[in-house]
Image (cartoon, rainbow, N blue to C red):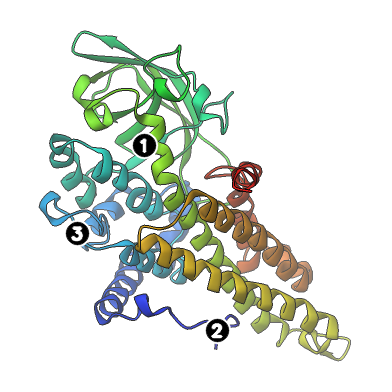
Amino acid sequence: MPVIDVPDPEFMQDEEIAVFRDAVGKFFEQHAPAKRVESWRENGQVDREFWQEAGAAGILGMTVPEEYGGHGGDFRHDLVVLDQQAAKEVDGFASSLHNVIILPYIVRHGTEEQKKRWLPRLVSGELISAIAMTEPGVGSDLQNVATTAVKDGNGYRINGAKTFISSGQLANFIVVVAKTDPNERAKGISLMCLETEGAEGFRRGKKLDKVGMDAADTSELFFDDVFVPADNVLGGEEGRGFYQLMGELPQERLVIAVGAMSTIEKALDTTVEYVKQRKAFGQTIWDFQNTQFVLADLKARGTAAKVFLNDCIAKLLRGELDVTTASIAKYWLTELQGEVVDKCLQLHGGWGYINEYPIAKMFRDSRVTRIFGGSNEIMKMLIARSM
């Protein structure tokens, strides 16, 4: 029995969801065995072929409407993929970025022509997506991005640099956050969609050496007079980019909270199993009252977090998840994730610091969740504004 024993909410108990969960689990078992995933960690990125395998299996673009090559599902199907990917320990595969963050930009904000042009190839895995927001000197302050997209004939020339870009080495479809009007802040931002194949002036920098998330490709990107046609401005009209970004952030932040919850549950399950077997001073680590108190506290708070998270998911499915609630979820669950993993590592003693133990990898992978998707300091600012 899992440590956090919260039943699936009613909206996840649909028979079709159960069938899909089984199919996704089998796909990951067959196509992402431990040996293949380990090679991704060694190489610092997932191989491109896996994306095409995932597309063929129907686990890309689940929420994309069928008329654009998608599967016509909803956020529950995205959750199943995230859940099974975590359960099967499929590191590095940026399904949450591709499915839950970037594809909705095209579905909700793209023109009809853009949807028909890009969505089928994003669903098949022919196009692997990334979003280029963060810049070396800007960080979370998106309104002050320095990358520009200046009109040139029937298109735009992009100039600038981006960093910390997930899937930066693999991606061949990049949504670039750029200033089309440098004299404006929010109103001057547009989202420029770039297909990288044959794009002169586009360059990938080094693959960044990170603390954790070894199989996830994170890179620098450089744009030197890169030309994009005018009809590659997302939505067909410049100056709407910041508002498009803000509209999708609640779902992005909820996905980060979902990932945090998966790690919390896995850390607790792994640690309870460990402390009940490991012996010291003539008894198991579990027999010490301190161990029981620490884990009981983490179970209590983890249980409350999961109930809250399920309520947030229900709100999202109803179209009611607001910025403040999503910010609370991202902030609270990633902070709890860090505390749970740290205390669970402590209960492993010296072995917790050895990379072959799952808790060590969880410890390294967890730290960044309080930074990406908007740092937790930004989350507190957003929460405070609602008070």
Looking at the rendered image, the quarter that the N terminus falls into is bottom right
Query: Label 2 to label 3, Cα distance in Å?
Result: 34 Å
Going from the N terminus, do you reach mark 1 or mark 3 first?
3
User: Mark 1 belongs to which amino acid?
Assistant: Gln
Nearest the viewer among 324 and 344 is: 324
**Which of the two residues, 220 or 109, is positioned nearer the viewer here?**
109
Residue 331 falls in image quadrant: bottom right
Residue at the top extreme? Answer: 153
Identify the residue under disc 2.
5
Mark 2 and mark 1: span between their CA atoms?
37 Å
Residue beneath disc 3: 56
Q: Nearer the viewer, mark 1 or mark 3?
A: 1
Residue for point 28% across, 15% down:
156
- Whether the residues at callouts 2 and 3 have beta carbons within 8 Å, the answer is no
Q: Which numbered dot is residue 321?
A: none
User: Is any part of residue 253 visible from this angle?
Assistant: yes
* Chain-order first, disc 2 or disc 1: 2
Of badges 2 and 3, nearer the viewer stands: 2
Residue 169: in sight, yes or no? no
* Mark 2 residue crowding within 10 angstroms, few (<14) / some (14–19) / many (20+): few
Question: In this rendering, would 108 be left or right of 183?
Answer: left
Residue 311 % position (x, y): 48, 69
Q: Which residue sits at x=64%, y=83%?
A: 273
Q: Position of residue 8 (x, y in %)?
A: 43, 80
Q: Secondary structure at mark 3?
A: helix
Q: Secondary structure at mark 2?
A: loop
The residue under label 1 is: 244
Under mark 2, the amino acid is Asp
